[in-house]
Amino acid sequence: MQSDKTTSPILASVLMVSAMAIIGVIDNVVILLADTIGLWQFHLSRALLMLPLIAGLSLFGLGGLRPKRLGPVILRSVLITMAMLFYFASLAMMPIAQALAGLFTSPIFVLLISSLGLKQTIGPWRIMAVLIGFTGILCVLQPNPGEFDAKTLLPVVGGLFYALSSIVTRSHCSDESTVALLASMIITLGLAGAIGVAVLSVFPIASPDGPDGFVFRGWVWDMRPAVSWILIQACGSTVAVFMLIKSYQIGEPSYVAVFEYSVMIFGPLFAWVALGQTIGTMQIAGIALIATAGALLGWRAGRAPAGQAAT
């Protein structure tokens, strides 16, 4: 299976762009269901719908459900669950362009963790990429020290956890079944949702109406207005995340990661067409800078000799 990772670059790129197109559309529906139910109920309900679909992928011969190395798979699942909780919470509170910009700080965190934690050498090109990406983040999030809002940091924290999960995926889970990784992630997200619902049932928190109450809302019995959106999310996520994981397993990660930035086109474009969300010139420039930083990091990683860190 190791040999498959670098033998299908075209298929890997097609899978990634297709996955990002689906995610760019379905993540926009979170703002619609956030009016009715809460973050935890959403993840629990979606997981219950996705698990039979994932089992079907296994029955069709697309991969086994049992991990080869349970420890790393669980660690990866916990990390990516934390990333998704922060990311989906931010989707209900800000335009998708801002949420995606925060989440896609992950390549910058990967670089910093590799340098500070793993003691890898960072050269001038990668330092420049970090500075470009950080500038892009500031352009998109537009933080105002006089009016600081912690909500703007939610997707950035998600980006940190996503970076950690990416490192674990590449270093310890490359030989795992795509279906096993997907199933483990969804089970962990479902468990997180169940825990959140249970805690809020025992210790309820007064939550505001609408999307602002998304994170603090407990179980809502009348969830009929949200069911169709959860179904769309469940089906779309099953297909998209399968393709995303598979693309990293059959293609060079540094090459594939560049195509992941296409979601920053699909997501805001659909939000503008369907939901009327608009972004300013400064935010468009910031998105371009973040994508440039990611492409630069991928280009340098792709040029590095085998076994040598890119500089």
Image (spheres, helix red, strand yellow):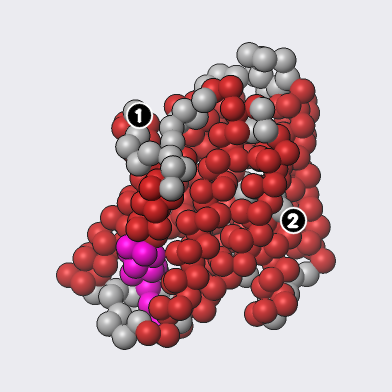
Q: Which residue is drawn at 35% across and 82% down?
A: 223
Q: Residue 257 carries which label?
A: none
- The answer to whether residue 289 is left or right of residue 36 is right
Residue 201: x percent and y percent? Answer: 21, 72
Pick whichever, 279 or 177, lies toward us: 177
Q: What element carries label 2?
A: helix
Residue 56: x percent and y percent? Answer: 39, 53
Quadrant in which residue 207 is drawn: bottom left
Residue 303 is one of the magenta-drawn residues: no
Q: Is residue 236 positioned above or below 62 on the image? A: below
Sequence order check, earlier mark of 1 and 2 = 1
Pick whichever, 155 or 234, lies toward us: 234
Q: What residue is disc 2 on? A: 287
Q: Which amino acid does label 1 sit on?
A: Lys
Q: Residue at x 49, y 29 (%)?
A: 174
Q: What is the spatial separation of the Cα atoms under label 1 and label 2, in whole angstroms?
A: 38 Å
Pick whichever, 287 or 219, lies toward us: 219
Q: Which residue is drawn at 52% across and 37% down?
A: 166
Outermost residue to the front = 60
Residue 74: x percent and y percent? Answer: 34, 38
In this picture, which residue range is highlighted in magenta?
Answer: 36-49
Are there few (<14), some (14-19), or many (20+) residues within 10 Å of tag 2?
Answer: many
Quadrant in which residue 22 is drawn: bottom right
Q: Residue at x 50, y 59 (%)?
A: 237
Q: Which of marks 1 and 2 is in front?
A: 1
Q: Is residue 256 positioned above or below 171 on the image? A: below
Residue 75: x percent and y percent? Answer: 36, 37
Majority secondary structure of magenta residues: helix
Q: In which quarter of the image is the C terminus?
A: top right
Q: What residue is disc 1 on? A: 68
